[in-house]
Each structure stands twice: as structure tokens, then as C-alpha cells.
Image (cartoon, coloured by chain):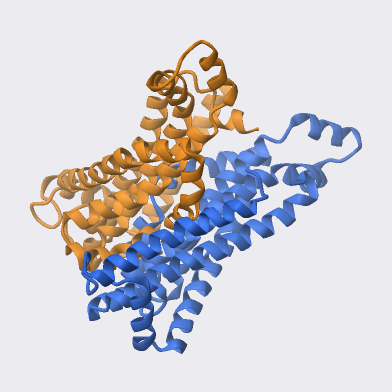
Chain colours: A blue, B orange
């Protein structure tokens, strides 16, 4: 993928987006689609502004971000450590690989009931589910990254006297970095999706709760704004992660 | 070969010792049976589920069938929509530029966040679940179809033109086969997405389907039923991904693997 996006691409993109928003706006205003069921963007934002307390919304956003960050960081960290260990040390691969293969096909959301049984309805159960969402993509990517490091690089480093942990830290992990980065980015997207689901099913704050609660009150406009907000948040945070990954990997692999 | 045998033996040893430790800890009170039902308890739960059912009358096979049918409907709808649209967008650069941000944003919207809105529109029935699955699968699918069509080697197309291939024939004999590996990769990812979405969507407002089963069982303090349900979900997930990988090998023998191509 090229990282440079030309100005004309941006203009075309803006045009397409504007066109869709305008069609949506006109369809809702002229009554082609019922505005009470699917309000136009401006109407939705306007009335959501009236119904929502701004401090409340910021708190919901804060809670969602807090949950996804804690769960993601724990999951990614565990995934990196276990994945690299399984790729580098034989005994670790014997121990962890079967367990990973066993649990990986179970989607994180299927853990929700068990998480509630184990940790109750509070924050730990959400952390746990998001942890799983982040863990599996990262652990797979880390493992694959380490085992597919070019053997020539490893032998060259050994010739220069590197061995053991030094070899792992200086050669194997930097070599695995691109795979790892892909895994981390997938993990972030998955964590985010899992977060929303967990908040829909069992929570009393957060963006997922906000839109589920709005449904009970029949506030379609709040739901629409909430959905757009969740999408935007996901997009922005994904952009930040991509940027950080570029800076990190750029040290070894260039662009 | 002996390496493989060693691996199998180790794997079996890890599992059996874990199961034994778990059984021992639960029966001797180190672990609470409600939180960690013993493997023997889970086995009993499986028998009960497949004979009597939970809730009574809805056996595990009914739940599986319901879930699989929902996934199939949404998935097929998404594919039927995404392939022609993706081809169109992938072949017309201006269309691709116009729609690019929309597709990126459509993908960023967490599928399950649409649940409240879709419930307002269509109630809590089957249609809601099918639509959610279709939504989730659609974006994964269409971005892969677009990429597949867009990145077809220009040399291939020019070579075909030199030999006089054009129009529909160009699509059937060159572009489609060249784009298929990516399309298949998208189809595989999309099915994974659909599977994840359905488990979440079934946890709200229904008693049929695997997601509903594991959630209901929790409400009635039947954690062993929850775990049986999770294991079945895992088995289906495994069958789906390995089955598609095998099908891909048979249907697209000219694919040298996306991993090799990208490096």
C-alpha cells in the first residue's frame, strides 16, 4: 500500500461522501424515508444535542476508551510474550500451541457468559473479553513472525557472537516486527468490536450502553449519533495505531 | 515423522493432565463447581443437551441449525451483493476514489453497534440477525473484491488484449481468475466476521441459537451448559475455517498463497 495519498484522491473521496450524506439528508427531509425511524444526519445531530448531556457523552466515551485500552494492552502484552516464547523456545511451543489452537476458534463474544460467571458484571469481565479479542490475533502474529525470521539473519548474527536472549532481542524480534504490527492492528479493531458488544449486553455506562439505552427510550437520533461516534472513534484510534507502528517499525524496516 | 508423533504425545499429555487436575480440584472443593464445572459434569451437560435440550425441547442440534441458517442467509446475501459491486468499483478508478472513504468508514462501524438501530427498524426477529451478519460480511468482502480486481497484474490484461481477448471474455478468462485468490481470502474472513457477529447478536432478545443458549444457561446458573455451548461454537468455528481453506485449495489451484505474493 502506498502511504502517499494525492490531493485529488482526497477531493474525490470528499465528493463521494458528501453526495451520500446529501442524498440521505434529502431523503429524510422530503419524507422518502421516515425521519422518525431514520433521521437525517443534521436532524439527528441537532436533536441528539438537545437530549444528551455533553458531560455524560464525554464520560461514556471515557469509559469505553478506558475499557478497550486496558483490555487491549493486557491482551497484546500477553500475546507478544507468549507468541514470541512459543516461536523461540521448543518447550513453550509444546505447551502453548495446543492450548492456543483449542481456544482460538471460539470467538471472544462467546466468552461473555462465562466471564460474567467468573468475574461478575463489573469491569474485570469486560477487560477479560477484550483481552481475549486482542490476545489471539497478536499471539498468532508474534508466533508466525518469529518462526519465519530469515535463518540467514540469525546465522549471520551468531557468527558475530550473538546468542541466547541477545539474539532474540536484537535479531528475532525486530525481524518479526512487521508480522507483529499487522497482528496488533487487527487486534485493535477486534477489541473495539468486542467492546461495543460487551457494552450492549451487560453494562451501565459506555458508548454501547448509551445506544442500547437510547433504544429503550425510543431515541433513534441518539442511536444514529452514537453509531457514527463509535465508528469515528474506531477510525481515529486505528489511525493513531498505524502511525505509532510506522514510527516503531521504521527503525528497522524503512517505510 | 517422529517429530510429529512427539508433538501429538506432548499435546495429549498437556490436555489430559489439565483435565485431570481440573476434575480433581473441583471434586475436592478447591474450585467452585459453579464457576468451574468439572469435565465429568460438562460431559453430563452435553448428554442432557443433545437428548432433552435446554431450554427443554430445544436440543443442541436445533440451536446449531438455527445459528448456521442465520449465518448462511446473511453471508450469502452479503456475497451476492459484494462481488458485483466490488467488480464494478474495482474496474472503474473514479468510482473507487469516490467510494473509498465510505467503505473505510462502513468497515470501522462496529457491526454490533447497529443492533439497537436494526431492532428499531425490524424488531427482534430473524431479519435483524440476518441483516447484521450481512452488514459485517459485506464490508470485509467488498474491500477484498475491490483490492483483488484493482491489483490484477496489468501485464496479464495487456497480454490477453494482444491475443484479442476483450469484453466479457476478458473478465471471465483473465480478471476473475486473477482476482479469485483475494476474493476467497475475503470470503474466509467474512465468514469469521459473520460467526462472531451472530454469537453476539443472539445474546439479545432470543432463546434460540448458540449465543442465546450460552447466555440463557448462565441466567439459570447452568455453567456446564454454557461451556458445552462454547465448545460447540469452537468446533463450528474450526470446521468453518479449515473447510474453507480446503475448498480454496481445490477451487483455486493456481493460487500460490497470498502470503508469498505479498512478500
Nearest the eye: A78 or B24: A78
Q: Which residue does the image show at 67% across and 50% down from the upper left? A: A4
Nearest the eye: B76 or B234: B76
**A27 in relation to B59, above or below:** below
Place residue B24 in its image quadrant: bottom left
Quadrant housing the N terminus of chain A: top right
Q: Residue furthest left?
A: B57
- Left or right placement of residue A33 versus residue B252 in this view: left
Q: Can I make out residue B57 in this image?
A: yes
Q: Can I make out residue B33 in this image?
A: no
Nearest the eye: A38 or B262: A38
Q: Which residue does the image show at 46% across and 15% down from the upper left? A: B165
Q: Residue furthest right?
A: A160
Q: Position of residue A252 (x, y in %)?
A: 79, 47
Q: Position of residue A175 (x, y in %)?
A: 73, 42
Q: Position of residue A46 (x, y in %)?
A: 37, 82
**B123 in relation to B103, above or below:** below
Place residue A228 in its image quadrant: bottom left
Place residue B220 in its image quadrant: bottom left
Total count of labels: 0
Q: Position of residue B238 (x, y in %)?
A: 37, 39
- Left or right placement of residue B222 versus residue B24 in this view: left
**A217 in relation to B198, above or below:** below
Q: Which residue does the image show at 36% across and 53% down from the upper left? A: B23
- Left or right placement of residue B185 versus residue B71 in this view: right
Q: Residue furthest top?
A: B163
Amino acid at each position: 500500500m502506498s502511504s502517499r495519498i494525492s490531493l485529488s484522491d482526497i477531493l474525490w473521496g470528499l465528493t463521494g461522501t458528501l453526495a451520500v450524506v446529501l442524498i440521505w439528508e434529502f431523503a429524510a427531509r422530503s419524507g422518502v424515508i421516515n425521519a422518525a425511524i431514520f433521521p437525517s444526519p443534521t436532524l439527528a445531530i441537532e436533536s441528539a444535542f438537545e437530549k444528551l448531556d455533553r458531560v455524560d457523552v464525554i464520560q461514556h466515551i471515557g469509559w469505553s476508551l478506558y475499557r478497550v485500552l486496558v483490555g487491549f494492552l493486557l491482551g497484546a502484552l500477553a500475546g507478544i510474550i507468549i507468541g514470541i516464547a512459543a516461536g523461540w523456545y521448543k518447550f513453550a511451543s509444546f505447551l502453548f500451541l495446543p492450548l492456543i489452537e483449542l481456544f482460538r476458534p471460539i470467538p471472544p463474544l462467546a466468552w461473555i457468559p462465562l466471564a460474567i460467571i467468573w468475574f461478575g458484571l463489573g469491569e474485570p469481565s469486560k477487560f477479560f473479553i477484550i483481552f481475549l479479542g486482542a490476545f489471539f490475533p497478536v499471539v498468532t502474529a508474534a508466533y508466525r513472525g518469529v518462526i519465519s525470521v530469515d535463518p540467514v539473519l540469525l546465522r549471520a548474527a551468531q557468527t558475530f557472537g550473538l546468542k541466547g536472549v541477545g539474539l532474540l532481542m536484537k535479531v528475532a524480534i525486530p525481524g518479526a516486527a512487521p508480522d507483529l504490527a499487522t497482528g496488533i492492528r487487527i487486534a485493535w479493531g477486534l477489541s473495539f468490536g468486542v467492546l461495543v458488544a460487551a457494552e450492549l449486553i451487560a453494562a451501565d455506562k459506555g458508548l454501547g450502553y448509551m445506544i442500547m439505552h437510547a433504544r429503550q427510550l425510543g431515541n433513534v437520533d441518539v442511536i444514529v449519533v452514537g453509531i457514527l461516534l463509535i465508528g469515528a472513534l474506531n477510525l481515529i484510534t486505528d489511525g493513531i495505531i498505524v502511525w505509532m507502528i510506522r514510527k516503531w517499525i521504521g527503525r528497522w524496516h524503512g517505510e | 515423522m517422529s517429530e510429529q508423533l512427539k508433538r501429538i504425545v506432548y499435546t495429549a499429555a498437556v490436555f489430559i493432565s489439565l483435565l485431570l487436575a481440573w476434575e480433581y480440584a473441583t471434586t475436592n472443593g478447591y474450585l467452585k463447581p459453579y464457576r468451574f464445572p468439572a469435565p465429568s459434569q460438562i460431559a453430563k451437560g452435553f448428554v442432557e443437551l443433545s437428548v432433552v435440550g435446554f431450554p427443554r425441547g430445544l436440543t443442541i442440534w436445533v440451536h446449531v441449525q438455527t445459528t448456521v441458517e442465520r449465518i448462511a442467509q446473511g453471508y450469502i446475501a452479503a456475497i451476492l451483493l459484494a462481488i458485483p459491486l466490488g467488480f464494478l468499483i474495482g474496474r472503474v478508478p473514479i468510482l473507487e476514489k469516490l467510494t473509498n472513504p465510505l467503505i473505510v468508514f462502513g468497515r470501522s462501524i462496529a457491526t454490533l453497534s447497529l443492533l439497537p438501530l436494526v431492532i428499531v427498524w425490524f424488531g427482534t426477529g430473524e431479519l435483524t440477525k440476518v441483516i447484521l451478519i450481512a452488514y459485517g460480511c459485506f464490508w470485509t468482502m467488498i474491500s477484498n473484491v475491490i483490492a483483488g480486481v484493482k491489483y490484477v497484474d496489468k501485464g496479464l490484461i495487456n497480454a490477453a488484449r494482444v491475443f484479442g481477448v476483450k469484453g466479457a471474455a476478458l473478465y471471465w478468462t483473465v480478471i476473475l481468475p486473477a482476482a479469485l485468490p483475494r476474493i476467497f481470502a475475503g470470503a474466509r474472513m467474512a465468514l469469521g466476521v459473520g460467526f462472531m457477529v451472530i454469537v453476539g447478536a443472539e445474546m439479545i432478545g432470543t432463546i434460540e441459537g448458540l449465543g442465546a443458549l450460552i447466555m440463557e444457561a448462565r441466567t439459570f446458573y447452568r455453567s456446564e451448559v454454557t461451556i458445552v455451548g462454547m465448545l460447540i461454537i469452537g468446533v463450528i468455528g474450526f470446521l468453518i475455517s479449515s473447510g474453507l481453506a480446503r475448498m480454496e485449495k481445490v477451487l483455486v489451484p493456481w493460487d500460490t498463497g497470498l502470503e508469498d505474493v505479498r512478500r
